[in-house]
Image (spheres, coloured by chain):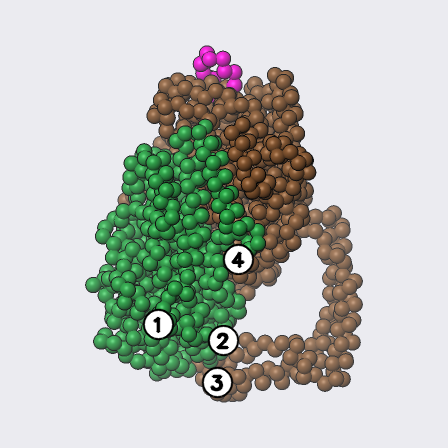
Chain colours: A brown, B green
Amino acid sequence: MIRQTLVASLLGVWGFAATAAVTQDTGVPSAARNYWAFKLPVQAPVPDVAVGLDNPIDRFLERTRQTKGLDRAPRAPRLTLLRRAYLDLVGLPPSPAEAAAFLADTSPDAWEKLIDTLLASPHYGERWGRHWLDVARYADSSGFEQDYDRPNAWRYRDYVIRAFNQDKPYDVFLKEQIAGDELDTTTDETFIATGFLRAGPRVAFREKDNPERRYEYLDDLIATTGRGVLGLTVQCARCHNHKFDPIPQRDYYSLVATFFGYVETTHPLVPRAEADAYEKKLRDIEARQAPLKAEVKKIEAPYEAKLRQESYKKFPEGVQRAIAKPEGERTPGEQLLAQQVIEGAAVGRREIDRIMTPDDAARKKAVADRIAALDKEKPKPIPVAEIVTDGDYRFAPDGEGDEVIGCPKCRITDATGTFLHDGPGKYEAPPSYFLIRGDPNAKGSVMKPGFVTAATYGNPPIEIPPADGRTSGRRRALAEWLVSPQNPLTARVIVNRIWHHHFGRGIVATLDNFGKMGDAPTHPELLDYLAVEFMKGGGRGPQRGSRDGVPWSIKRMHRLIMTSEAYRMASAFENAADREKDPQNQYLWRFRAQRLDAEVVRDSILAASGGINLTIGGPPVFPPLPKELMTEANHGIWKTQTDGPDVWRRSVYVYRKRGLAFPMFQVFDLPEQNVASAARYVSTVPTQALTLLNDAFVLRHAQLFAERVKSEAGDDPARQIDLAYRIALTRPPSQTELAIAWDATRTGSLVDFTHVLLNVNEFVYAR
Amino acid sequence: MKTCKTCWSRRDFLFRSGGGISGLALAHLLNQDKLLADEIVNSAACEAKAIGFNPYAPKPTHFKPRATAVISLFMSGGVSHVDTFDPKPALTKYAGQPLDGKVAGDVIVRQGHPGPLMPSPFQFKKYGRSGIEVSDLFPNIGGHVDEIAFVRSVFGQSNDHVQATYEMQTGQVRMGFPSLGSWVTYGLGSENASLPAYVVIQDGRGGPLGGVNDWSSGFIPASYQGTLFRSTGDPIVDLKPPSGTVSEAQQRARLDLLAKLNELDMQQYPGNSDLAARISSYELAYRMQSCAPDALDITKESEATRKLYGLDDKITEPFGRQCLMARRLVEHGVRFVQLFHGGMGNQNTDTWDAHGDVKANHSQHAAESDRPIAGLLTDLKSRGLLESTLIIWHGEFGRMPISQRGVGRDHNPGAMTVWMAGAGIKGGQAIGASDEFGYKAEQQPTSYHDLHATILHLLGIDHKKLTYRFNGRDMRLTDVYGVPIPQIVA
């Protein structure tokens, strides 16, 4: 009702709904492509700026600086660059030994070699995979009331880390995540990748009884793909045409149709024969247990009936009277009461056992023992991945949290079908409709799958069904459209994200919105140059390296960016004229110092203390939480582990619980975990100071840091201070700093000083 | 001015604030160093005003506010309006009959099947000059009806606890949206830089359903999220080092060393506001260590005051303590205090979620909260604070007029009663009405968006102008909805 009124009042506002030039078919005006983001990127000639800058990035940037009259900063000192590259690429500060080795390398390509080394580090994927996990709204729990554990979610997290480490081409990476079950060649890896689609929050009540929830989940898929991959707020077109961008509501429901067949299921991570054998064995044992379980029920039945009758006695007299009456004699109200009470009566097994005669108890125990013995014969559960494939959600098996709620008669009983397609013939997706004003009860016409019209060139297929006919091939078609060179957005959006993480601000500052309400690119030609370079993998490679010529290579993009002078500029550079002309440093006249991400703050503390456990991958860890927070964790799980090396893993491995953000991450601006993340916000609030000053974890590592320094530097205070600086800040102290620190350790203790080093501004910044 | 919208530096933030709703004076930017220095000099005062780049800096309102602070009393689990503030004689008249057929559409319940209509097990009585009826669950609140506006026609979207709680707190049934308190602190800033602007005190039996997302800042900066205070012991996690680790003198020495090293470092980055703000944040943190416990120190209260809140009775003591802390926090300039009564230890007995037995459940929870809430109203009034403080009382939804197994009541998002007091509200009135049975809001149906618009209005904020750019839109607490309740103010 409210929506109707609103829609009516907004009709006049929808620019393109009211304009004449609406194409009959698509609802998209022909002029829609006159916007930069919908035009295909084209490489402009690299400017000739004649200042001895080779890297094309520098030439584009320098031309803009010249236009704006900006002077650029000189190169940063080598140790600053070393620390910058480490924190940026692997999210850990360099060790003193690594710093010494870098300083000792005086070869002209020492910097290039350093980048290659860091890109080859297995810790690179932990850092850059985390950036993608922000986009994928990844967490280890389901969110909402129950906040169920997702015991296999980490397999997707590890897939992402591996993909970055292997430099999986971004087009392949996207295809696996969106249609890993529909590719020409599917592997465990591609199935695990579909975890992307189900990484968002879910209520977990089943969708067949609660259709509005299914539309919420579809919206999550569309919003995540839209904002995360395309940089478009497609989800704004759910109830009406997009108000600012040329995205008609039809496009939204074409995308709904594209995803509509999806179901969530598990995929065994063992060979098919082994999985089948496991299932068979399990079913065999369950079949042998079934008659035994029936026997137990039979023994319990008279006791259960007795207890059930007794349980009615706690209800008011009117209720008891209603139950006592034969069904035909009850008034309509009594019928409701009787039904509620009888169906709702639950008798606990423990109570039954309590009143059983010794004979029956012994008989029951004998049978129960045989059931238990069979339980022991059950095979060890096989590892599974939580995946997405096509099926029919209306036949989903009951799972954790599924219960008929609200409207029992809404439950579908008349349709016939199966959850997963098991032949014969080809899979057909359930019909998907246009929803008027987004209302699941106001169905319009049946929709064909499709994409964002304004960003579609040519006539790409809307279904690419696999040979085996198990799925519709709609997601596959979507994935192919996304990574087509004819898609104007995908490459621009990812190179812009990469740029953002290197420079602290994207060429388009709104990472997830390239539409009209986003920011315009500061360097449009550079953005297009990089996007095309990224897609073709051709042209002039920045440096030597095995990834030259590889299309969609993210590592190659890192190399291209990091070997620019722009990346190597100093951040400690003041120029009053520059500041006046470009106070926000949009045009990169100096490097932008960046506050470390929450995870990097914690990892840096662990690295400084030497306590860090660099094990890669596997199930998440549960560092201790303050006990006052545990009262909030009473849904879902938090399996607190003892504080120690087992939990001193890198932060990417800390359990992500939607109902309870890890406090240290939250205080340092953990982004919203439920939607694809834009850029992280950086705040400076006193609670951050309190955490670094008082938290038991920080104090313990300050202590370990001091012990490490003592054992490595010996008893000489000057050497201790020197080493502590090199560990925490990647540089020796100045004379003044040395004097101040020496004074402090003399009147206080070494740990006073190591603790302070974990708090100084320099420690939490990449400069 | 077009600036970076999603990755603000503090400077961006200030610029945007300057051009946007806050109107934070740009002079602060120009004088930042001096101001920050001034503030550090003034660091002894617990009443320090927020200045400079502090995201909590006070901001001007759109029009003259009626209140400057909010205390939200969230009755977790869902209070039955037909057993508290919305008497329904029809429930007695039609007792035992199905509701189906008497109302339009299918009767939908959260658990199992609907039961028949059930009269309230409680008696209603007229109170005050206005003669508003309140059930015998709340005799003390009943004594305040002439100060209270009851909105009997509130309705929500979801009959699920968490989604309904999110809707009440953020306007949306989904996760990921900023809470009311976050919007309020974003819109108004804070009067006190030594305490968080938005404080949450939850029930000792556990947090509410929905957890931290109930006071999350969603997509607006994390600085505006609620800070969880405990009602016993140190109020904030990490406020003090664990006992036996770092002494006060040691900590002061460390802070002095930190300041010296940071000042040296600043010489390389003159005029860098982020670094200056970070230095300043340590002094604020240091002050907070003594100011926060002081603000919550209810041992400073007189015996009479403690009694007023029911601290002399172990049934009323826990929530009385929360209410008394709320008053102290408001006195200290905290902008928004969110209290939760009822927490999820055992959902059936520890919250208002009366599926099992509405008489037993509501008798217990009303007994725990009636005196403390009445005490809060009395105390605020006698201190002259009620005029400038908005008190809002609500759950996440109402309950069904039909029974669950003859004794309980299921969730009902179709109708509930919410009341407000203080803030120049015209008391002694019942606004809107639910239908004959209390099943659906009927006269002047009031959505959660309308409630939010009303609350912002009372704080001097136009809910249509309080926006934050996200997802390509100027997002609002009230989305594209919301109308302030017209008759709520005198």
Label at residue B356: 2
Distance between mark 2 and mark 1 Cα atoms: 37 Å
Residue B177 on image: x %, y %: 42, 51
On the image, numbered disc 3 is attached to which residue? Answer: A316
* Disc 3 to disc 4: CB gap under 8 Å: no
Return the chain for callout 2: B
Distance between mark 4 and mark 1 Cα atoms: 33 Å
Distance between mark 3 and mark 2 Cα atoms: 12 Å
Please identify the quarter of the rendering in which residue B365 is found: bottom left
* Disc 3 to disc 2: CB gap under 8 Å: no
The crowd level at tag 4 (other Cα within 10 Å; few <14, some 14-19, many 20+) is some
Q: Which amino acid does label 2 sit on?
A: Gly
Label at residue A629: 4
The crowd level at tag 3 (other Cα within 10 Å; few <14, some 14-19, many 20+) is few
The crowd level at tag 2 (other Cα within 10 Å; few <14, some 14-19, many 20+) is some
Q: Quadrant of the N terminus of chain B?
A: top left
Instruction: Pick out the residue farthest to the left.
Output: B490
Q: What element carries label 3?
A: loop
Q: Determine the residue positioned at 43% across, 77% down.
A: B363
Start-end of magenta stretch: A41-55
Foreground of the two, A118 or A240: A118
Residue B159 on image: x %, y %: 44, 64
Q: What residue type is labelled 1?
A: Ala
Q: What element carries label 1?
A: helix
